[in-house]
């Protein structure tokens, strides 16, 4: 009997990778978790206007958001979009003040002052006064974004790195004010790698070319992470949370080394389910070694109940080979994830206790 010619069944001799939609033939357990074992604090989310293209609120209906939180078992959500001044006041009024205990809003620092032409000392003083004012009106912490190290420049045109002495002065002030820092430095390692056939995030970078930082105009990933470590070490009285699993979710051993050497360093899980989900045993070991230093967070905005349930499935079950996204092409890499089945006492710490302690939430 003649065998079918597989090539003849394709539209060309080579199926374009962008059109490949493989269906897994595994038959594995699929747990359905509607609610987490313990109420959750989402320590990493965005509810403001800062990241919206049209300056609208990322969550247009706060009542619907609270209903979603209740459905997903989320007690409190940290809003990282407070900015400063009028924007901070608007975020605090819309979330924290209108819904007691359900939200905690972080401010930002206006690093553009570093480009002011009246000297470094004056710029630092402005930012310190800005932080003091933000703390006075109710900011619960400070968000530092990846533009520090990638795009913020001073009056001379020089790129400002996270360990710049002016940054250190400002961050020490946050510590004196009792404001924890949630910091995002760099981006996934693949965003700094060559854009070639070996880059595991090529799908994502093709869709978002501005997320590639592998050119000579940017520091390397190693330089940025090194500067981050120096910043944290230089501010021992300031509490830090490293966004996205310490900004280095691809290397949990490296994350563990930072946690070991820097007692004021903590990490959140925001936006890195795909990464920790493909190394569940290493992640479980990390939490076991540092049970009080890992914070739950999603970085899913606007969030959905399904976003939370995927995290719960990863953290609570032993399920194997399940999708971390509903997208036909997974956005952060073409792989599936596996549950790490944390013990209940670790779940309670990660889900809420650590965030409540680090962020001083009621």
Image (tube, rainbow, N blue to C red):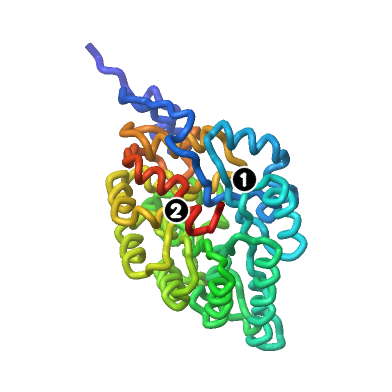
Q: Residues within 10 Å of mark 1 (few under 14, many from 20)?
A: some
Q: Position of residue 264 (x, y in %)?
A: 42, 67
**Residue drawn where x is 35% and y is 44% of the image:** 345
Q: Residue furthest toward the right?
A: 86
Q: Which residue is mark 2?
A: 354
Quadrant including the N terminus: top left
Distance Cα–Cα, label 2 vs label 1? 16 Å
Q: Nearer the viewer, residue 25 or 20?
A: 25
Task: Say if mark 2 contacts mark 1, CB within 8 Å.
Answer: no
The answer to whether residue 2 is above or below residue 296 is above
Q: Residues within 10 Å of mark 2 (few under 14, many from 20)?
A: many
Q: Nearer the viewer, residue 178 or 192?
A: 178
Q: Which residue is mark 1?
A: 102
Q: Position of residue 102 (x, y in %)?
A: 62, 45
- Snapshot quadrant of residue 88: bottom right
- Snapshot quadrant of residue 154: bottom right
- Snapshot quadrant of residue 312: top left
**Residue drawn where x is 44% and y is 62% of the image:** 192
* Circle on res. 333: none
Q: Residue furthest toward the front?
A: 362
Compared across the picture, whether 185 is left or right of 78 comes to: left
Residue 336: in sight, yes or no? no
Q: Nearer the viewer, residue 166 or 275?
A: 166
Q: Position of residue 280 (x, y in %)?
A: 31, 44
Q: Position of residue 13 (x, y in %)?
A: 39, 33
Pointer 2 or 1: first along the chain: 1
The answer to whether residue 114 is above or below residue 61 is below
**Residue drawn where x is 65% and y is 71% of the image:** 131
**Residue drawn where x is 53% and y is 47% of the image:** 42
Residue 168: in sight, yes or no? yes
């Amino acid at each position: 009997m003649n065998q079918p010619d597989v090539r003849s069944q394709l539209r060309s001799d080579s199926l374009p990778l962008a059109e490949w939609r493989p269906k897994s033939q595994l038959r594995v357990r699929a747990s359905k978790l509607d609610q987490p074992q313990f109420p959750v604090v989402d320590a990493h989310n965005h509810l403001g206007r800062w990241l919206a293209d049209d300056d609208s609120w990322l969550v247009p209906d706060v009542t619907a958001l609270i209903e979603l939180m209740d459905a997903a078992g989320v007690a409190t959500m940290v809003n990282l979009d407070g900015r400063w001044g009028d924007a901070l006041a608007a975020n605090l009024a819309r979330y924290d003040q209108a819904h007691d205990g359900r939200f905690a809003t972080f401010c930002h620092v206006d690093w553009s002052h570093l480009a002011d032409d009246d000297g470094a000392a004056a710029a630092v003083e402005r930012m310190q006064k800005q932080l003091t004012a933000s703390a006075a009106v109710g900011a619960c912490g400070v968000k530092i974004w990846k533009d520090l190290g990638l795009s913020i420049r001073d009056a001379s045109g020089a790129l400002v790195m996270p360990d710049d002495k002016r940054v250190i002065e400002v961050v020490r002030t946050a510590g004196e004010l009792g404001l924890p820092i949630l910091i995002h430095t760099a981006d996934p390692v693949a965003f700094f790698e060559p854009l070639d056939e070996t880059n595991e995030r090529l799908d994502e970078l093709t869709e978002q070319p501005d997320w590639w930082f592998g050119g000579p105009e940017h520091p390397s990933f190693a330089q940025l992470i090194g500067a981050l470590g120096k910043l944290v070490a230089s501010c021992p009285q300031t509490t830090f949370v490293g966004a996205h699993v310490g900004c280095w979710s691809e290397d949990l051993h490296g994350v563990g080394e930072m946690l070991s050497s820097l007692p004021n360093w903590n990490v959140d899980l925001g936006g890195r389910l795909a990464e920790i989900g493909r190394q569940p045993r290493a992640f479980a070991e990390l939490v076991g070694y540092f049970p009080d230093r890992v914070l739950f967070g999603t970085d899913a905005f606007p969030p959905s109940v399904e976003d939370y349930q995927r995290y719960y499935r990863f953290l609570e079950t032993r399920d194997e080979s399940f999708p971390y996204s509903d997208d036909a092409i997974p956005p952060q890499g073409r792989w599936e994830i596996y549950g790490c089945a944390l013990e209940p006492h670790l779940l309670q710490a990660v889900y809420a206790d650590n965030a409540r302690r680090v962020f001083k939430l009621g």
